[in-house]
Amino acid sequence: MDFGFSEEQEMLRESARGLLEKECPSTVVRRLIEDDRGYDAGLWRKLAGLGWTGMVVPEAYGGASLSYVDLVLVLEEMGRVLLPSPFIWTTMVAEAIKNAGSDAQKDSLLPKIAAGDLIATVAWMEPSGLWGADGIAMAARKRGNGYTLDGVKLFVNDAHLADYLLVATRTGGKGITLFAIEAKRAGIGIAPLKTMDSTRRLSEVRFTGVKAAAADVVGTVGDGWKTLADIIDKGKVMLAAEMMGGAQKVLDMTVEYAKVRVQFGRPIGSFQAVQHKCANMMIDVEGAKSAVYYAAWAVSNGVAEAPLAAALAKAAASDAYRRVSADGIQVHGGIGFTWDHDMHLYFKRAKSSEFTFGDATYNRELVAQGINL
């Protein structure tokens, strides 16, 4: 693997930063917090026009066929500005359709995702609160040539925006089967959940006698966990990259504040205690970034240890973002605790992201199991 980024990748990073800093300053984030939809449709169209929504979609379906190493550079910049967006979840669904979908599903869904015309999300968490396969209990019962879906999914990201849902179910009480179905299909009820992080929208999705055809199955009946586990790993890498962008922004804000905030007649950045705290923040950010970049390379190249790399990246990013955002508030002092300052937005995003796809303890346990500890 190459431990550096190419000139083209650095240009991608810089162009993404320039666009997002212009189009999504904190004033826009705060406006979207008050918006019922929680995202900017116009900005989504701009991102689609740049090809971002189709970065990992094959060229044959209107995408760019880029790697996750390319993708994480854009996601870091999204994290820097706290972009409220269904980008990660839509990309996960595109990945599932790309790798396991039928030709008809690829032809109908991938071009729309690449063009930004279709928003999708993944529904697999249930009231058990378990992230693994054991947490999936929702039934898909065989009815003639199709299926009937009944059950509840919790903490579904941006379900209120989604055109399509990728739903994980149990068929025959044993294997896991994935269905790609329209979010407005009869029998589907979507209710928003109150969350700490108002830049992320979560919903409860209830399925009551929802009819699904055999053509809605993604992959093979009873063998859906393999596909779901793969896109979860890639989702961890994408989210971890976004978290690192946010953590880097917090570090930059904190160092700048330490240079200009004067106390006892001198900038607080001249005090050793503040310097140590900022240095520890930098170590957290840089260490976690290394794990994220390696995981991006691993999932892009399908190496055997990719699931372990993804879990470790998510664990490292969870710890780093939590500590960095908390320390950033401490260095900012009283102003850091106020609503008017942006630090609380990053802290809340850090906490919500920490528990998405499982917290650091859960992901470290996956690593331990993977290496037989």
Image (spheres, helix red, strand yellow):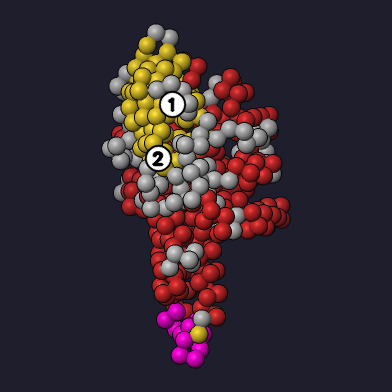
Pointer 2: residues within 10 angstroms few (<14), some, or many (20+)? some
Q: Residues within 10 Å of mark 1 (few under 14, many from 20)?
A: many
Residue labelled with disc 2: 192
Q: Position of residue 280 (x, y in %)?
A: 44, 71
Residue at x 40% of width, y 47% of height: 356
Instruction: Look at mark 1 in the image and give the residue it sits on.
Output: 178
Q: Magenta stretch containing residue 267, yes or no?
A: yes
328 or 337, which lies in front?
337
Q: What span is colored magenta in the figure? A: 263-274
Disc with the residue nearer the chain's start (2 vs 1): 1
Up the image or down, 343 lies above or below 15; here it is: below
The quarter of the displayed image where residue 321 is located: bottom left
Does the magenta segment cover residue 211?
Answer: no
Q: Is residue 271 above or below residue 43?
A: below
Q: Give, as a three-letter code, the residue at label 2.
A: Pro
Residue with the most extreme left position: 128
The picture places residue 371, in percent across and down from the top left corner, at 36, 46
Furthest residue toward top:
144
